[in-house]
Amino acid sequence: MKSIHRHRLPASDSGPDYRHIYFSPHLDDAILSCAGRIAQQTGAGHQVLVVTIFAGSGDGATRPPPAFAPFQDIPARRCEDRRALDVVAADHRWLDFPDAIQRHRRYASLVGITAPIARREAPLRRAVTTEVARICRRWPTAKLYFPLAIGNHVDHQIAAAAGFTLLSGGRPERAVTFYEDVPYVCIPHLLRQRFELAGIASPPGAAPTVPVCARAREAHAGLMSLPQFARHAGPVASGLLYALLTVRFGRAHCGARRRRWIAMQAELAGIDGEFDTKVAAVACYDSQVAAIYGDRDTMRRQLADCCATGGSNAMYERYWHPTEPDPAPPTQATFS
Ligand SMILES: [Zn+2]
């Protein structure tokens, strides 16, 4: 595992000359998705900042159901985040926007939390975009990383939208990269669904689409393999999830014909040497490991499955770069 070096924690706009800034919707997403690359960058002596957007505690007016308890103890989750970022030697900044489940009860369900961004959230979306843009202006040469919002969690959608606003006419004005949301990218067909919803063209060489019902069936099986879903889904909830997936895949597929506005090229970042560091960093999020994976052994096994792109034993994280139209075929990228 990589040695840990001491680093400063930014309290304001002062801070090191960051080369890379990762925008994380929640207090775990950047590490789940990008810890391997972050560890490589800090190991090479680059300063890395992770900005967590929805790291606020809210005003307490909205009380989510008990099942959401693992996500509500923000002080404890910030402690976990600080320890995880120490493992990869990255700095942190926590913005005070509250998590969706602390904003409205509509988000206390799978349907609500993965629905398109509601009109009532427009002021929040603008505030997030403004704050993200301000941070980006402060470090004008930093490379920027945003989630793709695979799985369509509304907070991930808002974070991704802030990244998309940095693209003008579908072309990048800054060095903007999008990362794949773990664990949802591991679920069959959710990546393609997100591309369809976001108006991103399928890469050249992508496998032909399979019928909507088959996609829903395979995605349902993938989701139910995650303890996060299996634990709470009885037969009725499981059936509703399958129905929801069928409707969402159908809508995304139909809408995709009208919404192609950007192309992206895949980059596979090899993380063989950093995979153990990634697992160690994710393990710092005790509350989230228990909620998402059940236990650390399952977490390690599922992360290994997720990072072994293309059926090989080599470990990767995959990143997507906005490109000029008609990009060259991506290297070794599978697209399910
Ligand atoms: Zn998240």
Image (tube, grey):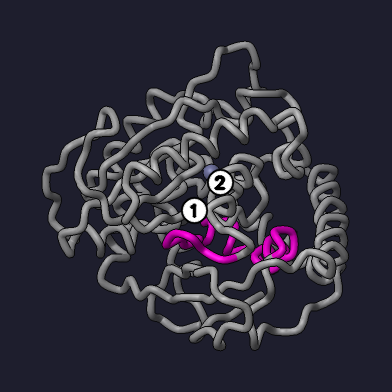
Q: Is residue 249 left or right of residue 178?
A: right
Whether residue 32 is situated above or below residue 290 in the rendered picture: below
Judging by the rendered image, the residue that carries numbered circle 1 is: 146
Pick the residue in front: 55 or 120.
120
Whether residue 22 is situated above or below residue 256 in the rendered picture: above
Q: Residues within 10 Å of mark 2 (few under 14, many from 20)?
A: many
Residue 191, percent across and down?
Answer: 64, 65
Q: Amino acid at mark 2?
A: Ala
Pick the residue in front: 275 or 114.
114
**Magenta span includes 129:** no
Q: Classify the position of the N terminus by image quarter.
A: bottom left
Residue name at image x 76 percent, y 43 percent: 115
Q: Is residue 204 left or right of residue 36?
A: right
Q: Which mark is residue 99?
A: none
Contact between marks 2 and 1 (CB within 8 A): the answer is yes
Whether residue 44 is situated above or below residue 104 in the rendered picture: below
Q: Classify the position of the C terminus by image quarter.
A: bottom right
Q: Amino acid at mark 1?
A: Phe
Comparing marks 2 and 1, which lies closer to the viewer?
Answer: 2
Residue name at image x 60 percent, y 40 percent: 155
User: In terms of secondary structure, where does tag 1 sit?
Assistant: strand
Residue name at image x 61 percent, y 48 percent: 161
Cβ of mark 1 under 8 A from ligand 1 = no
Q: Which residues are magenta?
A: 171-199
**Magenta span includes 187:** yes
Residue 233, percent across and down?
Answer: 73, 43
| Cα separation between marks 2 and 1 | 8 Å
Q: Which mark is residue 162?
A: 2
Residue 124, percent across and down?
Answer: 62, 29
Pick the residue in front: 133 or 88.
133
Residue 14, percent across and down?
Answer: 23, 34
User: In terms of secondary structure, where does tag 2 sit?
Assistant: helix
